[in-house]
Amino acid sequence: MKNKNKYEIALNNLCEYILTKGWVYLLLAGGLYLLYRYIGRGDFSMTTILGIFPLIAVGFILILTQSTKGFYVLFGVQFALVAGGMFFQIKMGVTTLIMTLFLSLLLIIYNIYKKVDWHRCNNLMLYLFIIWGMFCILELANPNNVMEAWNIAITHYLVYPLACILLVPIAIRSPKHIVWLLIIWSIFVLIATWKGWYQKTFGFNERELYFLYVMGGAKTHIIWSGIRYFSCFSDAANYGVHMAMAATTFGISAFFMKSKWLKIYFLLIMAAAIYSMGISGTRAAVVIPVAGIATFVLLSQSKKYALYGLAVFLCMLLFFRFTSIGDGNQYIRKMRTTFYPSQDASYLVRVENRKNMKELMKYKPIGYGQGLSKGERFYPKERMPYPPDSWLVAVWIENGIIGLLLYLIVHGVLFAWCGWTLLFKIAHKRLRGLLAAWLCMNAGFFVAAYVNDVMQYPNSIVVYTGFALCMAGPYIEQQMKKEEEEEKAKQPKVIEET
């Protein structure tokens, strides 16, 4: 009996060890066996999958246990997918849609076991996009609608805004969390800058040459002004616009950093982003920092920061519009043409195209269907014969004048409410400055949206993160006050001796 008890105890101990710690070693041993086996066969695709499997497993466990912080994962994955496009063909639309829905579902499941403070998500942005979402659903009844195109377009139109409304207020609860978002973004900016520099210094790889000379990218990337570099992005316009967004956000945020090293780091990120913006040769990118700084001047309640912003704005305007300094540099010379639109042949072609579009759109009050502004590959019954030259023109083509007006009203109200919130509802200077950086970037983005197709990956999630942060601002300030009060309560009271 004693021997039997010893065996039972030993077996129980072994089972307990395997369940608590041993499974890790078994999994590691099995993984190494499979890894060596596939390497021996020369199957490097399976080797790669097995190599990244531990990272996927760890990420899944972190998401599951830290669902309220899932937005950091979603935010970082957008950049990781774009960077991964340097090595693999990634279907961004499908991948990001699945990831967004997955994280939102996990948060709802997490709420079953541990209550989540949902009232933070109950704001004006939610109701605005519910109204816009109803219109998007009604677009399914458009006689020209193609379901596949609608499925792709709905990600930018509705899924990302709703995901940001749901996840941002729950995950971001202090200025420190906003700084973490900026740090995640900064890593991607450095990678994209390095890749752009590498293309400029050493040339294009096979995948990039295929894009240029087989898919026809050379028509818009090797032009009279020189080569337009596109880094790991879909094209040079997307690259330049995204880097202009980063330059605006990090440049303003740097002024509100407590840490001297973070301030210097963010200024370096801004400089890297400006370099990338220059080598992209994207003229529309210039308007983002200009409009962003102008918005900052309007939002700033500090005379000092308002004067700084006004000085930078005037210097940029004077430099590009009223001087010829730097014309020897092809990138500066090309950017300067942004301020002389009447002398730009491509701009004049766009103006003529929009006149022709206007005649056709008279008979399309709800547009050609979402996702069909560039929908030749979906073979719709009808399509616009003229290419959309900007995001807002694409919205007009796809949703008609009714949809365009609703889209502009939704975002106009959103800008007005966020601006009013920063001016009158948030007293903490550092928090207001950090939030203003994102809203100023958004202002520049939508000015650029009038002249270029800017609503591409990963821009959309950054834009709606900015709006959602401003909506969450009052709750963040309340949380900060609560933590300060708790910290004061913990401090020992000093009793004065009489």
Image (cartoon, rainbow, N blue to C red):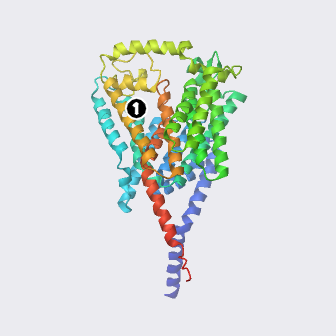
Residue 214 visible at all: no
Q: Closer to the camera, 473 or 59?
A: 473
Q: Closer to the camera, 203 or 412?
A: 412
Q: Is residue 35 left or right of residue 6?
A: right
Tell me what residue is drawn at x 54 percent, y 64 percent.
23
Tell me what residue is drawn at x 43 percent, y 52 percent.
474
Q: Residue furthest bottom?
A: 2
Tell me what residue is drawn at x 52 percent, y 50 percent.
429
Horizontal and vertical percent position of residue 100: 43, 44
Name the quarter where the C terminus is drawn: bottom right
Horizontal and vertical percent position of residue 34: 59, 51
* For residue 173, above or below residue 433: below
Q: Closer to the camera, 91 or 396?
A: 396
Tell me the quarter of the picture where residue 126 sits: top left
Q: Residue furthest front?
A: 498
Q: Closer to the camera, 91 or 279?
A: 279
Label 1 secondary element: helix
Mark count:
1
Label 1 crowd bin: few (<14), some (14–19), many (20+), radius 10 Å: some
Q: Is residue 130 left or right of residue 100?
A: left
Residue 266 visible at all: yes
Say which residue label 1 marks.
Answer: 153
> Residue type at mark 1?
Ala
Tell me what residue is drawn at x 72 percent, y 29 percent.
201
Horizontal and vertical percent position of residue 30: 58, 57
